[in-house]
Image (tube, helix red, strand yellow):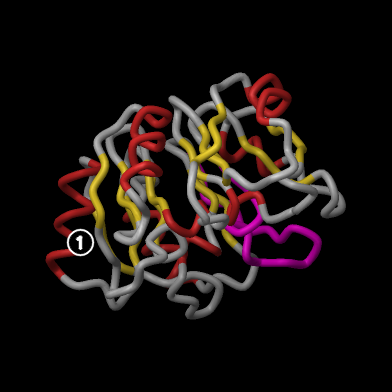
């Protein structure tokens, strides 16, 4: 298990551009060379793809070991994406496009934007095969951008309230703590790519931030 500092084409906000589960790492095919040590740190195969011709894979999608969710209004053929990743991929009905920003999930549960409609939640629950809870983090509805979660732990926006932290621990069934990444960024979900085996963080992440990330996600 390891936490590795690196950038994608000089960009430190890795969570916006990649999606990781305990089975794969999905990265953009049009963002220059992605270091091989990215997949080595997470101990999973790396697949290059796009979602609706966008490199923002982490913003547009969310997933766990059971499935991946993508927006309804995309140009991507989810069947081809499903074949590439080796896991079911489902479109989520509704107007929301930035699902990676709206959903925080691991293999135990999911926290979602409280404004997502029931129809969307039903498909999300069936795809990810986990119980779902509507909640905010730090009073923010973009819970996926405000946190990163694995099957070992969850790192949350530093302004999260105690009740919100308890919801994450209860529904994701992991210990949670607060922290920042990339030299003070509170939206850790946009900065970090992680699974149960390791994590990728931007090169500008400080030593104290690195220590908190390692401890919270269970890599020490």
Which residue is nearer to you in this view: 56 or 127? 127
Q: Secondary structure at mark 1?
A: helix
Residue depicted at x 50% and y 46%: 194
In screen coordinates, is 93 left or right of 53? left
In screen coordinates, is 173 left or right of 204? left
Which residue is nearer to you in this view: 79 or 67? 79
Q: Which residues are magenta?
A: 1-19
Instruction: Find residue 147 and report its image quarter.
Output: bottom left
- Image location (x, y in percent) of residue 123: 40, 34
- Image location (x, y in percent) of residue 181: 49, 70
Q: Is residue 193 above or below residue 22?
A: below
Q: How many marks?
A: 1
- Image location (x, y in percent) of residue 219: 39, 46
Instruction: Find residue 23 and report its image quarter.
Output: top right
- Image location (x, y in percent) of residue 152: 32, 41
Q: Is residue 170 above or below residue 114?
A: above
Residue depicted at x 37% and y 39%: 106
The question of residue 8 being in magenta is answered with yes
The residue to which callout 1 is attached is 165
Residue depicted at x 35% and y 51%: 117
């Amino acid at each position: 298990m390891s936490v590795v500092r690196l950038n994608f084409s000089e960009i430190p906000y890795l969570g916006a551009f990649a999606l990781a589960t305990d089975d794969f790492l999905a990265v953009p095919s049009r963002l220059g060379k992605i270091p091989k040590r990215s997949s080595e740190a997470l101990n999973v195969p790396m697949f290059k793809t796009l979602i609706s011709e966008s490199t923002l894979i982490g913003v547009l999608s969310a997933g766990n070991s059971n499935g991946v969710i993508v927006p309804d209004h995309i140009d991507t053929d989810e069947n081809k994406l499903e074949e590439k990743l080796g896991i079911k991929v489902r479109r989520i009905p509704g107007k929301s496009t930035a699902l990676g920003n709206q959903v925080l999930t691991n293999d135990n549960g999911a926290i979602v934007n409280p404004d997502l409609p029931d129809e969307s939640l039903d498909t999300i629950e069936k795809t990810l095969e986990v119980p779902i809870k509507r909640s905010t983090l730090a009073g923010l509805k973009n819970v996926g951008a405000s946190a990163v979660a694995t099957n070992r732990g969850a790192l949350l926006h530093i302004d999260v309230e105690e009740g919100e932290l308890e919801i994450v621990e209860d529904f994701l069934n992991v210990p949670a703590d607060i922290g920042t990444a990339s030299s003070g960024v509170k939206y850790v979900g946009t900065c970090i790519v992680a699974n149960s085996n390791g994590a990728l963080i931007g090169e500008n992440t400080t030593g104290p931030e690195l220590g908190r990330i390692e401890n919270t996600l269970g890599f020490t």
